[in-house]
Image: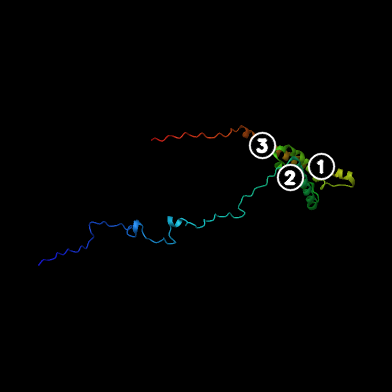
């Protein structure tokens, strides 16, 4: 009788096939079937926004954080004179109500008004500031000067007030003149620098090098 040959069972892996890497065992095409990352995980996948999701809103600036700028109006020669006269009339009335028409208080308040008038006049009318300042002082002095009866009494009180506050009048006019002089020098230098500045020249484009074949 013929005996059938039995092949021994091979417990180990076959030699003809190579083992697949762990990344290729999950599915076809070598893509692993791992689930989505947990919500707390950090990484490039978690940092990227999903398509269709709203963009993060930009941080808003808190109110009141913007820089405060000091107003710099530009008055004409006539506007500077009207400004100085109006302010001195208001200050004269306040001086009469609060300090019983003190000429010293009126003179002290006149100096900063002269500075503001010289600073707020535009560049083309700088020379009008030292002229309009004494006029504003005289107009405001009507509210402070002691006046008698009639027109002659008012004129005599005004002349007396001018004689008493002549020092403050000269001081305010001198301050306005110095301020105007400084502004004039700076303006002339700025115009000279702008005139001597060379015109803007466009940059020359460098020729592109031919690529070697």
Residue 42 point in image, percent of width and height:
43, 58
Q: Secondary structure at mark 1?
A: helix
Q: CA distance from mark 3 to mark 1?
A: 34 Å
Residue 177 or residue 21, whichever sits in front: 21
Q: Is residue 150 left or right of residue 111?
A: right
- Near mark 2 (Cα within 10 A), the count class, few <14, some 14-19 or many ≥20, is many
Q: Which residue is mark 2?
A: 113
Residue 165 seen by the camera:
no
Comparing marks 3 and 1, which lies closer to the viewer?
3
Q: Which residue is mark 1?
A: 162
Residue 19 or residue 77, whichever sits in front: 19
On screen, 92 above or below 178? below
Q: Which mark is residue 151?
A: none
Q: Secondary structure at mark 2?
A: helix
Residue 130 point in image, percent of width and height:
75, 39
- The mark nearer the N terminus, 2 or 3, is 2
- The mark nearer the N terminus, 3 or 1, is 1
In terms of image quadrants, where is residue 186?
top right
- Quadrant in which the N terminus appears: bottom left
Q: Is residue 149 left or right of residue 12?
A: right
Q: Is residue 27 left or right of residue 81?
A: left
Residue 113 seen by the camera:
yes
Q: CA distance from mark 2 to mark 3?
A: 22 Å
Residue 102 point in image, percent of width and height:
79, 48
- Near mark 3 (Cα within 10 A), the count class, few <14, some 14-19 or many ≥20, is some
Q: CA distance from mark 1 to mark 2?
A: 17 Å
Residue 169 point in image, percent of width and height:
77, 41
- The mark nearer the N terminus, 1 or 2, is 2
Comparing marks 2 and 3, which lies closer to the viewer?
3
Q: Which residue is mark 3?
A: 187
- Name the residue furthest bottom: 1
């Amino acid at each position: 009788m013929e005996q059938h040959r039995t092949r021994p069972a091979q417990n180990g892996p076959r030699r003809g096939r190579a083992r697949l890497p762990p990344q290729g065992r999950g599915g076809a095409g070598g893509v692993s079937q791992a689930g989505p990352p947990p919500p707390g995980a950090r990484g490039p996948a978690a940092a990227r926004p999903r398509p269709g999701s709203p963009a993060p809103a930009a941080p808003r600036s808190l109110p009141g954080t913007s820089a405060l700028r000091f107003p710099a109006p530009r008055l004409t020669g006539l506007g500077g004179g009207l400004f100085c006269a109006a302010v001195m009339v208001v200050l004269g009335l306040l001086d009469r109500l609060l300090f019983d028409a003190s000429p010293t208080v009126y003179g002290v308040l006149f100096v900063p008004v002269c500075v503001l008038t010289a600073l707020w006049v535009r560049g083309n009318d700088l020379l009008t500031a030292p002229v309009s300042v004494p006029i504003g002082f005289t107009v405001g002095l009507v509210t402070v000067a002691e006046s008698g009866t009639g027109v002659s009494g008012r004129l005599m009180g005004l002349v007396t007030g001018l004689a008493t506050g002549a020092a403050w009048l000269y001081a305010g006019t001198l301050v306005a003149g110095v301020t105007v002089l400084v502004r004039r020098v700076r303006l002339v230098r700025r115009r000279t620098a702008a005139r001597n500045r060379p015109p803007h020249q466009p940059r020359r484009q460098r020729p592109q090098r031919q690529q070697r074949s």
